[in-house]
Image (tube, helix red, strand yellow):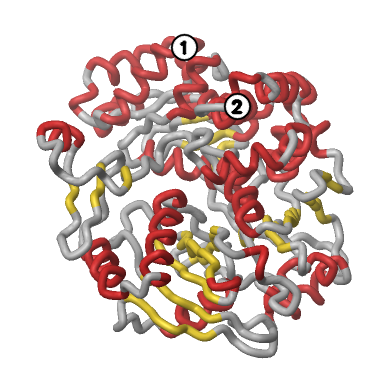
Amino acid sequence: MSGRLRHEGTSGPKEVGWRENPERTFDLVLKVKCHASENEDPVVLWKFPEDFADQEVLQTVPKFCFPVDVERVSQNQVGQHFTFVLTDIESKQRFGFCRLTSGGKICLCILSYLPWFEVYYKLLNTLADYLAKELENDLNETLKSLYNHPVPKANTPVSLSVNQEIFIASEQVLKDQPSLAAPYFIAPDRTGLPTIPESRNLTEYFVAVDVNNMLQLYASMLHERRVLVTASKLSTLTACLHGSAALLYPMHWQHIFIPVLPPHLLDYCCAPMPYLIGIHSSLIERVKNKSLEDVVMLNVDTNTLESPFNDLNSLPSDVVSALKNKLKKQSTATGDGVARAFLRAQAALFGSYRDALRYKPGEPITFCEESFVKHRSSVMKQFLETAVNLQLFKQFIDGRLAKLNAGRGFSDVFEEEITSGGFCGGSSRSYQQWVHTVKKGGALFNTAVTKATPAVRTVYKFAKNHAKQGIREVKSKLRHKENEEDYGTCSGSAQYTPVYTLRSDKGESLARRKLAQVVF
């Protein structure tokens, strides 16, 4: 949840994340005037498109445009970019990209489902320049062209021209016709790892926070704690929130996620469930005066982290040591070095999930918690016993199972890292065969079981050689086997149906009442 709390339906929560195929590049652009005091609301001076009619959005967004104590802070925030997040009814994140101008009294905001931070920050600068020069016609033409054009595919050059349609072309076309305008931006690839210095979020986070505190925060997030981050610069604050959350890939933070909390929502810090919240330094004392319990707090300005937990020591020491050494190498500081270092840590911690996948004739592929945890070192086993109850891990497994049982299969940088690092029992060749089989309509089998049981090995060979005949014929062969153990079943096997649970902390009922009173 991000930016608001909702009552969960009886069917259980949906995975929090990005919308895969948004209809537009952006939904709304606002010019908002700051309120003189917290007793007043910000005023919308201008909007695009003019016929945008979602009143809930129009009332909510302006309140996130000035997430500071407006009576104390203004001038030093001018020109800064920051991004808040709202979550829609389908649990998909919508981003509010902002730029403060006019002495901090005016905010330009672009609302979009696309996490194109660098693109929209650049566009905000262009819009601010148009407004400063009173070129409102040019501003409207630019927004109209971008708004009406289909969302470009990843890595596609996009050229914006005033009084012309947007030109979207392949790189080859641009090479063949150099007279065409240079691309205004390249549509980002959301499936790739963030790189330094291209990713502003990761770059600012890596520069502002030292390695030890990055590791502490990472460990706290893996234990799904209540985490508060504070800073005096809005740009740095939201960059640290987005940057740290991105390093959980391929998992996603599933709880309250508010990169910058406006004053009217400070009671969210009393929520009796995990959260990741950013607080501007002008508001932090008011937050500290509330009844906070078991909160991890990172002060970016002083580069200090306070925590009542010892989460980092709960992670396997070899994984932490390897990650720390990698982050301190000079060569890691550019490109995808930082993101890949955390990716490798994630693969080391969770990559063996492949060995815990199970298939039973006539039933969906499932995940066996018992198999995932056992046969590991004592420290790793202790961590994994906790990890299987994490919402971010449950949603990750759910996503993998959904793809496998739909016959789609999957291949991403995380799976590649598992294979190259040898973090699962199967060989690289075996895994590629699994993926190939699933994509062709076959079933996925656990490699360790395949090696150990001749019956399953025979059926697996059949599935691989006859994948095009589809999963039905494979399952038909399996139904003739009488011993369920041949198929890698386990007492702890489960296809997750995650349910959010509230911690039974002291003061939970009070926090519930406070949250219930929050109204946008």
What residue is at 64 percent from the left and 89 percent from the top? 40
Instruction: Determine whether 206 is above or below 275 in the image.
Output: above
- The spot of residue 98 in percent (x, y) is 51, 64
Q: Residue furthest bottom?
A: 39
Image quadrant in which the C terminus is located: bottom right
Label 2 sits on a secondary structure element that is helix
Q: Nearer the viewer, residue 407 or 197?
A: 197
Give, as a three-letter code, the residue at label 1: Ser
User: Looking at the image, do the residues carrying marks 1 and 2 touch, with CB atoms under 8 Å apart?
Assistant: no
The answer to whether residue 6 is seen in the rendering is: no
Residue labelled with disc 2: 333
Label 1 sits on a secondary structure element that is loop
Residue labelled with disc 1: 427
Q: Nearer the viewer, residue 400 or 442?
A: 400
What residue is at 66 percent from the left and 68 percent from the top? 75
Instruction: Determine whether 223 is above or below 411 in the image.
Output: below
Judge left or right: residue 115 versus residue 172.
Answer: right
Labelled disc at residue 7: none
